[in-house]
Image: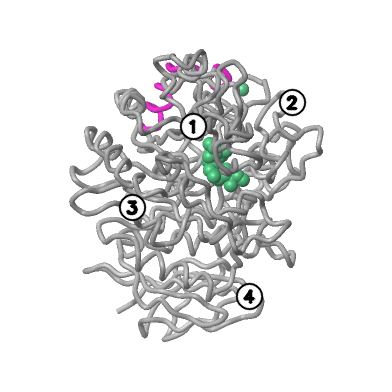
Amino acid sequence: MDAPGREWWREAVCYQIYPRSFQDSNGDGIGDLEGIIRRLDYLNDGTPHSLGIDAVWLSPTYPSPMADFGYDVADYCDVHPDFGTLATMDRLIAECHRRGIRVLLDWVPNHTSDQHPWFIESRSSRESPKRDWYIWRDPRPDGSPPNNWRSVFGGPAWTFDERTGQYYLHSFLKEQPDLNWRNPEVEAAMLQTLRFWFERGVDGFRIDVIGRILKHPDLPDNPPNPEWRPGDRERFSQLWLYNHNYPDVFNAVKRIRKVFDEYPGRVAVGEVFGTPEEIARFYGDADSPGLHLAFNFHFIHERGHAITPWEAPVLRRIIANAEATVPPFSQPCFALNNHDRSRFVTRQNHDGRGLERARAAPLLLLGLRNTPFLYYGEEIGMADVDIPPERQQDPARFRSVGRDPERTPMQWDASPGRGFTTGEPWLPFGPPSPNVAEQDGDPDSLLSLYRRAIWLRKELPALRAGSVANLGGDEAVVSWRRQTPGAPGVAVAVNTATVPARAQLPFPRGRIVLCTVRAREGERTGGEVELPPLGAAWIAEEA
Ligand code: TEU
Ligand code: CA
């Protein structure tokens, strides 16, 4: 499937599937692996009529009590019956590979489910041989938790276990106790779970919140966050100094990488948070690498939870920081959407023009030097769905923000079941439109724009493998050039203003090869191009 030594992930376009919400095949209203298999041709059937995806990332499908919908794993080496069986996963992997699609699973190393046999054993007694597989501590003299750490979902990060008289640490829900990665038995056991799936042909992993797997050994209090104001998210009331991106994490990442390197062509993509410099640390060094790729979520939110505005100067800064910090032996990894964040169309709809910005979004994401991740439904412009209280599912809703609105079922058509299920969906649908069926045959649809962008990216060497140059523009426009020796350059220009704007081009003669206004494609350009309001274009250099 791959020329030896050519690392597929450098030129890949990846697609995140939230398995519960992609395709249900047995009418129980919950998406499953058989359902995903049935939709693989939509993702890539080798023709430009498909999206042309090179890899899929599946959010967790492991046995789990589903307290956090799979991010509470009770068995790392099996499949939850709601999703299918190991045999179904084997078939999915085979069917993907037959279409040239790589398969990334989701690895959750920071915590297990409290129903995982390891934790059941660990909490059974203080003398348990697995007691030290988790982080247990005595209460403070006044009975309060061992330190002031907060759960990401709100509340203390500690829960008291009456029977053994100690607190255990959980960075997320109490149903998600943190593993003690300072215990070499834990590390060995977890690394073995990677080999289990590599042996079954899995091509890599998206690694869940890897920045938290090692904490300061003394578990000291975190200092207060001086910028925090009452009303801000509780979890930002502290600076996560001792339980997030703690220095020892980066060495552990290098040890994890070694297991990936035991199997050719496997890729490690980390879910990380922090400054551009902190993100870059996860890549390691040329002679002792860490992750192949580390997510940069700055197009979604840069610091804290503030939504990143779709404004040229901000986008330009994010691109410049990533290009300046990511080590030369790798590249950035951007996403505009995922299962934890409000969808782009909704985030950027403050003036009712979110869908227009969503047409420019793929030209930015796919026009940059990076390994981009799309999120199911993004390609048809799905928005957040308001979920009535009685239908809400996400536990984060109680003390943080519920993520159900960005996790609703894929809209394949406008029928009552949206082509997703013949049963009652686990989360309510959005309005009948947008959906794939209405956009499939429409050359001006967002879906068609995503397809053209992805296939053009494969075709044009400068976009597939080129460096970024001439990053520039002004208050309205962000633009850059992609270039690679022996091939024409491609200019990318994005207008974030609601009025037309001119973009200066880095070459005197070109031709628009992709534009948010399809009718402009084929147009010749001189040294500049006029962009429609909120519009974007890719211009190929001409001799
Ligand atoms: O998320 C890690 C994380 O810290 C945030 O994305 C957080 O979940 C979010 O801000 C809450 O609003 C990962 C997974 O992506 C997420 O779905 C899981 O809930 C979490 O880890 C725990 O496994
Ligand atoms: Ca199902």
Disc 1 to disc 4, C-alpha distance:
48 Å
Q: Nearer the viewer, mark 1 or mark 3?
A: 1
Nearest to N terminus: mark 2 or mark 4: 2
Q: Quadrant of ligand 2?
A: top right
Q: Which colour style is shown?
A: one colour
Identify the secondary structure beneath mark 1.
loop
Residues at circles 1 and 3 in contact by the CB criterion of under 8 Å = no
Q: Magenta segment range?
A: 81-98
Q: Mark 2 points at which residue?
A: 424
Disc 2 to disc 4, C-alpha distance:
41 Å
Nearest to N terminus: mark 4 or mark 3: 3
Residue 210 on image: x %, y %: 42, 42
Does the magenta segment cover residue 97? yes
Q: How many marks?
A: 4
Residue type of the residue flagged with mark 2: Glu
Residue type of the residue flagged with mark 3: Glu
Mark on residue 11?
3
